[in-house]
Each structure stands twice: as structure tokens, then as C-alpha cells.
Amino acid sequence: MAVIHHTTLKPNKLELLTVWLPSRPWYHSRAGEPELATSGGFRLDDPQGEVGIEFIVVTDTSGPHPTTYLVPLTYRGAPLDGAEHALVGTMEHGVLGRRWVYDGCHDPVLVTQLLALLEGRVQAQDQNTSDSPDREVTCSYTGEGSASVAFATTATDDQDGTALAVPHGATLRLHRVLRPAQDEPPFLPQGATGHVSGSWHMLDGTRARGLFAVLQANYRA
């Protein structure tokens, strides 16, 4: 079980993301520096207790139309070998010391636990409270066999999000730009064999739900 430490972070997460987000192909605004606010998210536990796993939802108000992004992050006590390209930055944690923060789509620990979540073998955890399930995160899986076998993470960013190559010829597509769904459960594209959906805060104080990730067989970008 991950322990949530309520302590200082220098720089904090939003400060790191303000610098990093504009470098992503799926970042939409060109209005200048992002103006970010935390809108929601959830956590997953690392079975080994070494890696912090957080799916943070942030809303950028710098452009004419606010845009909400899903940003999976991992927090490590040492650099992840071969993942220099995925480094978001480093921070000083008031309890744990220096932490290396990565785009979690390139971290095999996060990807493995995300697939386990999708299959219903682990449960999403509250973003801010230790040992508290987040029951607003819902999942489905209708594929054959387990997608959560050992593999080398391959993540590809484009203007719409991030595609993760997973076993059995499938692709897990993360929706980096979040859009409220019109139906519950959300409408899934043809060929989908699983999904993860969740909620976040809108700027007007209401709650929205939408797709975070979709598993598809033989996805073609």
C-alpha cells in the first residue's frame, strides 16, 4: 500500500508540468506558458512499494478554451535506466528526498499496474489519502487471456494521445486530452476490449466523467 505524505515538494508537480507539457505533441494550447490547476486523478500501488504511481488530471486555462489533460506520472528514488527521454524533472520531497519524476507511459511499473487495473486485478486508490479506494474509477476487460505479462514498454505520442503496445497484438490508447462522455458507461470504439474511465472537476465546480484509456485489438494510428 502506498503511503501519501503530505509534505513539501520543490518544485511542485504543477511547476514541473508547466515546463514539460508544451513539449508534448498532444498539448493543444499555443497561448504561451500553461496556467495549470489540479482537477482530479487517482493512484495505483506498486507491489514492490518502490515506485509512486499517480494519474494526475490538470486543466490548462492559458488558451481561449480550457483544456483538461491526463498525465500519468511515476516517482522514483533513483533514475530509471534507459528512460532519460521520459524524464519530466526532479523534485525534493520533504520526507523521501530527491525524486525522479517520469512520464509514466514509459515506465514498465505503471504500465503493468494500469493493465492489472483494466483487468480488475487491482483497485484504483484515492489521490490524496492512504489506503482509500477510488470507486469513481471504473474498468472493463473482455479480451482473452491476460494482457499483463512481462514486456518492454513501447509508447508513442501523437496529437491525440499516447499509444502503448501491449501483448497479443493489442494497443492501449491513453486519452491525454479528456472530454466528458455523454453516456455512462461511456461509448467505446469498435474493436475495444477494455477501458478505464474516471471523473474530474470542471472549472464551474461540476463533475465530469470520461474515458482515460481504451484497449483495442490491432489498433492503427
Image (spheres, rainbow, N blue to C red):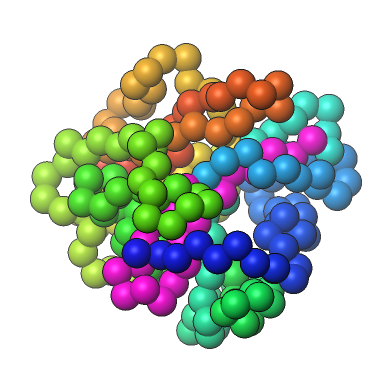
The answer to whether 97 is drawn above or below residue 56 in the figure is: below
Looking at the picture, tell me which residue is in the foreground, 84 or 94. Answer: 94
The C terminus - image quarter:
top left
- Quadrant position of residue 197: top left
| Percent position of residue 193, x then y | 24, 36
**In the rendered structure, does residue 210 fall within the stretch colored magenta?**
no
| Percent position of residue 171, x then y | 34, 48
Point out the residue furthest to the left here.
145
Looking at the picture, tell me which residue is in the foreground, 185 or 134. Answer: 134
- Magenta stretch, main secondary structure class: strand
The answer to whether 174 is drawn above or below residue 84 in the figure is: above
The span shown in magenta is 42-61
Say left or right for 119 vs 158.
Answer: left
Point out the residue furthest to the right here.
32
| Percent position of residue 49, x then y | 36, 73
Residue 106 visible from this viewpoint: no
Say left or right for 60 vs 162.
Answer: right
**In the rendered structure, does residue 59 fall within the stretch colored magenta?**
yes
The N terminus - image quarter:
bottom left
Looking at the picture, tell me which residue is in the foreground, 53 or 30. Answer: 53
The answer to whether 94 is drawn above or below residue 157 in the figure is: below
Residue in view at x 62 percent, y 82 percent: 97
Residue in view at x 70 percent, y 68 percent: 8
Residue 37 visible from this viewpoint: yes
Q: How many marks?
A: 0
Residue in view at x 32 percent, y 75 percent: 48
Residue in view at x 69 percent, y 33 percent: 67
